[in-house]
Structures are given as C-alpha cells and as structure tokens.
Amino acid sequence: MLDLAHIAGRYGTDKAVHTHYLRNYEHYFADLREQEVRLFELGIKEGGSLLLWRDYFERGHIVGLDIEPVGLDDPTGRIRTYQGMQQDRELLDRIARENAPSGFDIIIKAS
C-alpha cells in the first residue's frame, strides 16, 4: 500500500511539494484509510488532490468544490466536483445532502 507522498507524485497536486501536509495527513488519517470515509475538500484547483484522496481512501467517497470549473476523469465514480463559492451556504447544504447526509468524516480547506 503506497503512502501519500508516493500517490501525490502521480497527480501533480501541490500537496506533493508541501510534504509537511502529507506527513500530518498520514498521521491523522491512517486509521481511516480502510473505511468508507466521506471527504470534502474546498479549493481543489485542477483536482489532482481529489485523485490523491481517491487512491489513498480506496473505499472513500471524495467531493471537491472550487470557484473555477474542474473537469476530472474518474472512472471509479467515487469523485464528485462542484463549482461555486465556499461561502455559499445553500450550495454547501446541497453538497452535504447529496453526498454525506450523516456528515462528512473529513473536511479539508485549502489555505
């Protein structure tokens, strides 16, 4: 099973450059890796990090939001992307209803 640094190198995500993030994520998320997590990331640029999370959480459902449209090829069907502003509460409520009615397990906000 590959670690986050190896997976990140596949997809051109900025997380591959900022390895301190990957070490922290690995530490906090290791116990969740085999579970059917619901992960929501705000600020996804081209979506490379969503592919990273899809591969890391092999049973996870991955959702991303960005102000710009993101076209992402995901043959697994486990990634969904939305376009909009992260301050839009109606949009956030809809995303939660559609993807994680019981709540997301992990929410990551890009800085």
Image: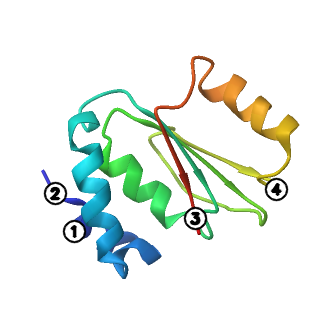
- Name the amino acid, label 4: Met
Position of residue 41 in the picture relative to residue 11 (left or right): right
- Name the amino acid, label 1: His
Residue annotated with mark 4: 85
Q: Which residue is drawn at 60% across and 69% down?
A: 46
Q: Quadrant of residue 84?
A: bottom right
Q: How far is disc 4 from disc 3 in space, using C-alphas?
A: 13 Å
Nearer to us in this view, 78 or 83: 83
In this rendering, the answer to whether 8 lies above or below 92 is below
Position of residue 67 in the picture relative to residue 102 (left or right): right
Q: Which of marks 2 and 3 is in front?
A: 3
Q: In which quarter of the image is the C terminus?
A: bottom right
Say the numbered circle drawn on residue 6: 1
Q: Residue at x 46, y 62 (%)?
A: 49
- Name the amino acid, label 3: Ala
Q: Which of marks 2 and 3 is nearer the N terminus?
A: 2
Nearer to us in this view, 93 or 56: 93
Residue annotated with mark 3: 110
Which element is circle 4 on? loop
Q: Residues within 10 Å of mark 3 (few under 14, many from 20)?
A: few
Say the numbered circle drawn on residue 2: 2
Q: Which of marks 1 and 4 is nearer the N terminus?
A: 1
Toward the left, the furthest residue is: 1
Q: Position of residue 82 (x, y in %)?
A: 73, 49
Q: Residues within 10 Å of mark 1 (few under 14, many from 20)?
A: few
